Image (cartoon, rainbow, N blue to C red):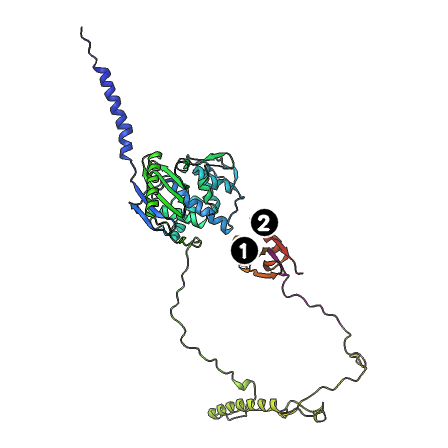
Amino acid sequence: MKVRRTWPARYGLFILAAIWVLVVLPLSASAAPYAAYVMDARSGKVLHSRNADTRLHPASLTKMMTLYIAFQAVERGEISLDTEVKISRFAASEPPSKLGLKSGQRIAFRYLIRAAAVKSANDAATAIGEALEGSEAAFARRMNRTAKSLGMSRTTFKNAHGLTESGHMSTARDMSILGRHVLYDYPEYYNLFSRRSTNAGVREVANTNRRLLAAYRGADGIKTGYTRAAGFNLVASAERGRERIIATVFGGSSTSARNARVAELLDMGFKRAPSRVALRKPKKPAYVPGGAVKTVRTSGITRTSLRPQLRAVAALVPAPTAPASTPAAAQASTSGVLSADIDLALAAAQETPIAPSQTAPASEDLSGSNLAGITVRPTMRPAGRSVSDGAPDLPQNEVVTRLSTSGGHQWGVNVGRYTTRYNAERALVTTALAEMTTLEGTLRKVVKKPTGFEANFLGMTRDSANLACRRLAARSISCQTVGPS
């Protein structure tokens, strides 16, 4: 009897078809668009571009902006690296990749930076945003203000971590611009991106870009990113000799394929870039505060300067009486008094004072107009006679203490001694921005001493000086109060 073996074969075909429909087809349909950009980091010159201005999902490349703002905040004194940040329930609930922070946990700000830069931890990125601006929405607004100031014209941020969200988009060109600013604006922090692993406070974490760092000669950063909508993204930088290249890829199909493509782009960059190029660092933008900025426009300029009118002399020097019915005569007499008064004063100033024997007697009425040419001198006190002798009606000597008109604002705060006046003035500005509440309205003064230039805030009360110094110490800024002496 012949046995038919059709069902097992049919089952096999059904299984293969199901796998293709459920796995292969969705993956091919959701393949992220590809974009690439290569620049000479020294000059910013474009060496290669493909779909560089197409708005795509940046994924965790977003964290470059989160970290840029974190570096900026530390520089401005908004927060210190040792500030203990309390983790919110919202930050703790972020999906992987994450550090594993717990709601209510406190952790130093420096560890959040390390976790976001090296581990690409979403919970750490959200905690950074909340620590600086209070909420994710407020931090996203600051991200967009900063992006605009950097020239990232086609970027819109909605969160601090880069997980897919409607409207959260960027381009390969914009992310390359951001990577260049991270490199040159905050070189003291750039080494974070080349660490193969780092201590993130709660545990040791490995770098998500460690494969390229290990495989490509000269590679030292910057940031990886992946979501299903974005694909495998990477902004990489490498330095060989005097040359430095930044290459960006959006939409890689896998980690290995993305790394291979970035290595090809970096090689292309090193071949096309000249060996000697003058380093032209990007201009570091100023901090852009939130809220509406009021613009004041001048409608014109002053073209004439009016001479102030002379004060009416009738109130100062009695004018000759004139009939009320002749206003013209009154005006003439008023002007005449002014001229005569000036001539009289000049003549009196040029005359030689008369001798003491010609001094007018004390009983003479000196209120008239016969003062011209007469100098009145007080009689000399008899020798050996004090003020109180023979004058019982005069008060005895009395000591009067002069009250201070400064209101007790004779204290200040010293924030250090510096080798140059420029460094001292810069320290005063930086400190004033860090502690605007208690230092507002104080006088910033640099005092030159034999040992250097001292930076001081003056015009404070003792209590306000002590309060300011305590608040500065909390921000890891050394200071000491300065008393009236």
- Pointer 2 residue: 473
Q: Is residue 299 above or below residue 98?
A: below
SS for dot 2: helix
Taking the spot 40% from the left edge, 61% from the top edge, the residue there is 295
The reply to whether discs 1 and 2 touch (Cβ–Cβ < 8 Å) is no
Residue 369 point in image, percent of width and height = 62, 92
Identify the image quadrant of the N terminus: top left
Q: Amino acid at mark 1?
A: Ala
What secondary structure predominates along the stretch shown in magenta? loop
Measured Cα–Cα span from mark 1 to mark 2: 15 Å
Magenta highlight on residue 6:
no
Q: Nearer the viewer, residue 191 or 151?
A: 191
**Residues in magenta, as a range:** 398-414
- Can residue 405 be found in the magenta stretch? yes
Horizontal side, residue 434 vs residue 171: left or right = right
Residue 427 is labelled as: 1
